[in-house]
């Protein structure tokens, strides 16, 4: 397991992060029951195996099974006797947590209420990375930033991040945090997979320029890239995809990716899913890939991705089969940048006019 710097902070996290969206989804939890219903004993086993495999990073959210995921996580850490300083604990707020108009969003009120409830459920005195889970179209960005800054000054939160934000809003937040002298957004959590590379259009350039951490959710596109499915196949009744078809995926492109990954997987003697994870781990701007599992065998397979080194030729093949179609202004910028780079890298002869 490798450990990577979390953005430009001094914190280091494992390149694989244990996601907890599969925890606690009982029959009363709506869509969460379709994603996973891992209870306490099973969760303890998953956490123990992940820690043994070198994982030091856990990601959860208040909305996962409406708080039950956080509760199970907190109990697991206590029952396993894990030292708080050995674990980087991340959670999120912003989703709908009740029927009232203020039980969601990124307002100061909701953030302040939510962090206290998350701390109680997790049974900890601070959260290492507190993330705004959704792009609130109502609350001013500066209100959100000031609330998060207050939490860091109080010691309840150590670093802040966002999830599912557009590049324009994220850039605005970075500028405002500097102007207002508030805590900076250090991470972006975003959907990214070999079959869904949209994040590369605007967000990856921003993340790289601003030296932010990029945390990847749904790296297997909701199980679609596990290798169990292909053209003409249908998700079985026990799979997440059969009950909760998310995130949206271009199936034609996905099956092309799966076919190419299957060839490479057979060469390495591993699963297709492990190749999909290894492709993401090879991206230099990816900080950590969040894996969400229900069973120990799934976890073991995912953890094995950290040991796979894809060759340059394999990466070229995977990049080619999954390449995004051209878009504007991307294709124009690429065209104009090429000429500029060529001019800056070629030796130029200067004509010097001497005045007598």
Image (cartoon, helix red, strand yellow):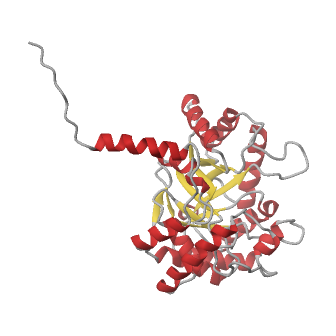
Q: Provide residue 56's location: percent of width, then percent of height.
A: 54, 66
Q: Provide residue 326's location: percent of width, then percent of height.
A: 56, 52
> In the rendered image, which quarter is residue 41 located in?
bottom right
Considering depth in this image, is 126 or 218 the residue closer to the camera? 218
Residue at left offset 70%, top offset 34%: 143
- Determine the residue located farthest toward the left in the rendered image: 356
Whether residue 128 appears in this view of the structure is no
> In the rendered image, which quarter is residue 113 located in?
top right
Considering depth in this image, is 226 or 161 the residue closer to the camera? 226
Q: Provide residue 318's location: percent of width, then percent of height.
A: 51, 69
- Is the residue 212 above or below the residue 172 in the image? below
Considering depth in this image, is 151 or 295 the residue closer to the camera? 295
Considering depth in this image, is 320 or 280 the residue closer to the camera? 320
The C terminus lies in quadrant: top left
Is residue 232 rendered to the left or right of residue 314? right
Residue at left offset 46%, top offset 51%: 10
Residue at left offset 46%, top offset 64%: 3
Whether residue 245 appears in this view of the structure is yes
Q: Provide residue 188's location: percent of width, then percent of height.
A: 59, 51
């Amino acid at each position: 397991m490798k450990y990577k710097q979390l953005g430009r902070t001094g914190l280091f996290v494992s390149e694989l992060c244990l996601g907890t969206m599969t925890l606690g989804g009982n029959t009363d939890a709506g869509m969460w029951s379709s994603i996973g219903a891992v209870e306490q004993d099973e969760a303890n086993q998953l956490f123990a195996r992940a820690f043994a495999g070198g994982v030091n990073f856990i990601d959860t959210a208040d909305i996962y099974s409406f708080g039950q995921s956080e509760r199970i996580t907190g109990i697991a850490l206590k029952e396993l006797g894990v030292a708080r300083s050995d674990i980087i604990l991340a959670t999120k707020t912003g989703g709908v947590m009740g029927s009232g108009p203020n039980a969601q969003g990124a307002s100061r009120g909701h953030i302040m209420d939510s962090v206290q409830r998350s701390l109680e459920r997790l049974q900890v005195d601070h959260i290492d990375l507190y993330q705004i889970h959704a792009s609130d179209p109502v609350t001013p960005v500066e209100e959100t930033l000031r609330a998060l800054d207050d939490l860091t000054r109080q010691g309840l939160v150590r670093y802040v991040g966002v999830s599912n934000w557009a590049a324009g809003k994220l850039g605005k937040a970075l500028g405002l945090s500097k102007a207002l002298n508030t805590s900076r957004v250090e991470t972006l959590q975003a959907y990214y997979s070999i079959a869904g590379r949209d994040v590369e259009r605007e967000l990856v350039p921003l993340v790289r320029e601003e030296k932010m951490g990029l945390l990847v959710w749904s790296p297997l596109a909701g199980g679609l890239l596990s290798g169990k499915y292909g053209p003409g196949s249908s998700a079985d009744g026990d799979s997440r995809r059969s009950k909760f078809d998310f995130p949206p995926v271009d199936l034609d492109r996905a099956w092309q990716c799966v076919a190419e990954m299957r060839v490479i997987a057979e060469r390495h003697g591993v699963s297709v899913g492990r190749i999909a994870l290894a492709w993401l781990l090879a991206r230099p701007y990816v900080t950590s890939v969040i894996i969400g599992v229900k069973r120990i065998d799934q976890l073991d397979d995912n953890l094995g991705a950290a040991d796979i080194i894809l060759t340059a030729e394999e990466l070229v093949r995977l990049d080619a089969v999954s390449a995004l179609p051209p878009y504007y202004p991307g294709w124009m910028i690429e065209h104009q940048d090429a000429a500029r780079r060529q001019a800056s890298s070629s030796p130029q002869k200067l004509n010097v006019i001497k005045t007598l």
